[in-house]
Structures are given as structure tokens and as C-alpha cells.
Amino acid sequence: MYQFIQNTANVSSDALLHNISLIISMEQKYGISFPDVLRDYYIHYNGYKISLCVFRINNNEYEVAKIIPLDGDTLTFEKIVDNDRADGFISSNFYPLASNRGGDLYYWDCNTQNLFLVYADDVEHPISICHSITEFFKLMSDSASEL
């Protein structure tokens, strides 16, 4: 399912437990529940590099360069959510999932599970991408398999 992941080496049991702990912590902190497919991805592949994925929707081209990690030295899930809430411009139902090379973010809506692209210079007009993280990962995997 995750054909876009560059290195699929097995994760140690310590890393698995760490990732599960991170998920539980984020769910408790924000009062959300990660969808099963996202939970599975983060448990097994949190922080893994991905191939650049490019796909088309309604004659528009989109790219995904990175899945937002739960932890690490870069912009993480928690840092982005906390910054978004402090700024007040992004819907409180939106949680970061991925980014393109320009730093624009893909968000999943915790109420509807829909995915949106939010351009950094146009946060008032999120672009609907698809209806679930499963569908989003399929777009990415199909793109990666065409390379």
C-alpha cells in the first residue's frame, strides 16, 4: 500500500512502541483519533523518507514530497498543529499530513476525514484533494509506481 516509501526496512520493537506512544499522546493532547490507515503508517513508517509523488486531479497537478513526522528535528505534527492553533488561520478540525516541496501543507479533517491542500499564501481557500487518507495514500502509491 505504501509504494511511495523509499526504505521499508523493518522498525525495531522499541521504535514501534515509541511510535504507538506518540500516537496516543497526540490523540490525547488534541482530542482526536487517528484514522486506522494513518495510525498504521505512523506506527511502522514514522519519519521515513518518501519518493516525490505527483498526481493529477481535475487537470491540476499536485505533488507530495514529505509525510509530516510525529517527532524529530524538523517541523513535526505537534509543532505544526500548535503553530496553526496559535495563528488561528487554519480550521481547528485540520491536522497536517504531508507537504509539497514548496512547504504547502496537506491536511486531513478530523471530522470528515477529507484531505485538503492549503497553500501557505492562501490559507483561506483550502483545495479539496480527496475523501480519505486511504484514497490519498493510493494517489501517492499509484504515482510512485509510475516512476
Image: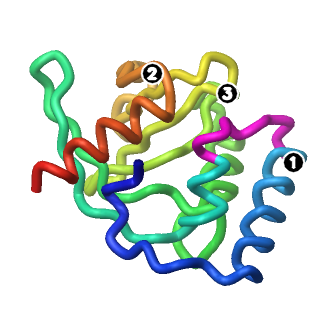
Badge 3 or badge 2: first in the primary sequence: 3
Q: Going 18% across and 37% down the picture, which residue do you hit?
A: 55
Whole-percent x, y for residue 137 in the image: 40, 41
> Residue at position x 39%, y 50% from top?
99
Alpha-carbon span between mark 3 and mark 2? 18 Å
Question: Could you say whether the residue bearing mark 1 is in a helix, strand or loop?
Answer: helix
SS for dot 2 = strand
Quickly name the residue at label 1: 29
Distance from label 3 to label 1 (Cα)?
Answer: 14 Å
> Please, what is the three-letter code of the amino acid marked with disc 2?
Glu
Q: Which residue is mark 3?
A: 110
* Highlighted magenta segment, given as a residue range: 29-38
Image x and y of residue 132, in percent: 50, 26
Q: Quadrant of the C terminus?
A: bottom left
- Which one is closest to the eye, mark 3 or mark 2? 3
Assess disc 1: are there few (<14), some (14-19) or many (≥20) residues with their C-alpha within 10 Å of its C-alpha. Answer: few
Question: Which amino acid, mark 1?
Answer: Lys
Residue 23: x, y in percent? 76, 55
